[in-house]
Amino acid sequence: MLPLPVLRRAAAEMENYAGCGMSVMEMSHRSPVFEKIIDQAQQLLRQVMAIPDNYKVLFLQGGATQQFAAVPLNLMTHSGKADYVISGQFSLKAYEEARRFGDVRVLASSEKDNFSFVPSFAPRDVRPDADYVHICYNNTIFGSRFPAIPDTGDVTLVADLSSCILSEPIDISRFGLVYAGAQKNMAPAGLTVVIVREDLLGPSQPRTPLMLDYQTAAKNDSMYNTPPCYPIYIAMLVLAWLRDEIGGLEQMAAINRRKAQKLYAALDQSTLFRPTVRPDSRSIMNVTFVTGSKETDARFCREAEENGLVNLKGHRVVGGMRASIYNAMPEEGVDALIGFMRSFEARQSF
């Protein structure tokens, strides 16, 4: 979901952006007009996320999935070792991909418990010679998240922030690298953001394709080839909305926590619905829940859609329901869902 003010501004500028006589989708990425857009998008991201000066911001393509290969190819270059925390479907895929490029170990996993919580670990559990530790900070499919940034000691921490970026403040200096597909909270699909500490931009593995080498993007200001121009433009508008209309990430976080707390409270009080994630690992972006009956789950999703509540069906590997309450989802949307849940529950015979 995108903020309505952003959609309206993009619609108004569709045919003629800033008086240039064309849409952002039509202009050259080498034009002064677009160069100003990508520069403004980067500066806004640095400002909103408080990104330190010694980090590079890269606007890439290929989705977060492409980073599953790019991260080990660029960072697993000293000991050739990396430790991965498996807390959901995407961290598992990242681990499986990284195994192709070096000595990769599972540091902690909650897979045997159907990813119903985020596994914990201590710095002493990390291999001291590992090039990095990889986590997925928020697990979209399973509705879990790290309650705090884990301590990896002297080993570089890498995080997939795809489904929680811009939802709350996060101390980038605690990470060596973070990456995120933009399609959850930032922009339409097609843009991937990588924020990497400059000292990690060393030589990549010799077999690294040019387009997966972070140095290629860094040396060319994310424009070695044609970047995803329109998603970058929308990201610029979203970041301006976060700064100017919401007031920044502290205010955004307060809104998001309030929405999530309302929904979890309704689930905890229900006799029909139950959340699938332990309280200490619950996501504020993706709320997953079930009734215990596949037939009842399907009926709930069907009737919810008939009442204007869409995209509630859970991921195929989990089932049940998933309410994704990203930044642009207004509190009224959560209230409407809670109201329908109570109405649906009242109509069931136990």
Image (spheres, rainbow, N blue to C red):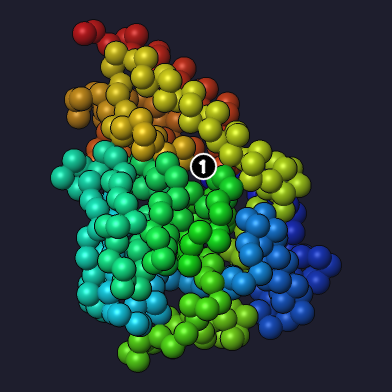
Pick the quarter of the image with the C terminus. top left
Residue lying furthest right in this view? 19
- Viewer-nearest residue: 25 or 217: 217
Could you say where residue 87 lies in the image, as x and y percent from the top left?
29, 50
Could you say where residue 11 lies in the image, as x and y percent from the top left?
69, 53
Could you say where residue 51 lies in the image, as x and y percent from the top left?
63, 62
Residue at label 1? Answer: 326
Does residue 32 appear left or right of residue 45 in this picture? right
User: What is the tally of numbered marks visible in this picture?
Assistant: 1
Residue lying furthest bottom in this view? 206
Question: Which residue sits at x=51%, y=84%?
Answer: 215
Circle 1: residue type? Tyr
Could you say where residue 29 lies in the image, as x and y percent from the top left?
66, 79
- Viewer-nearest residue: 12 or 283: 283
Tell me the quarter of the picture where residue 348 sits.
Answer: top left
Does residue 258 appear left or right of residue 155 in this picture? right
Question: Which residue sits at x=19%, y=25%?
Answer: 293
Query: Can the viewer see residue 166 in this picture?
Result: yes
Q: Considering the numbered disc 1 on the image, is that residue within a helix, a strand or a loop?
A: loop
Does residue 266 appear left or right of residue 8 in this picture? left
Residue lying furthest front in this view? 124
Does 76 sit above or below residue 286? below
Pick the quarter of the image with the N terminus. top right
Question: Which residue sits at x=30%, y=80%?
Answer: 79
Does 225 sit above or below residue 229? below
Query: Can the viewer see residue 59 in this picture?
Result: no
> Label 1 neighbourhood size at 10 Å, few (<14), some (14-19), many (20+)?
many
Does 203 sit above or below residue 306? below
Tell me the quarter of the picture where residue 154 sits.
Answer: bottom left
Question: Which residue sits at x=63%, y=45%?
Answer: 249
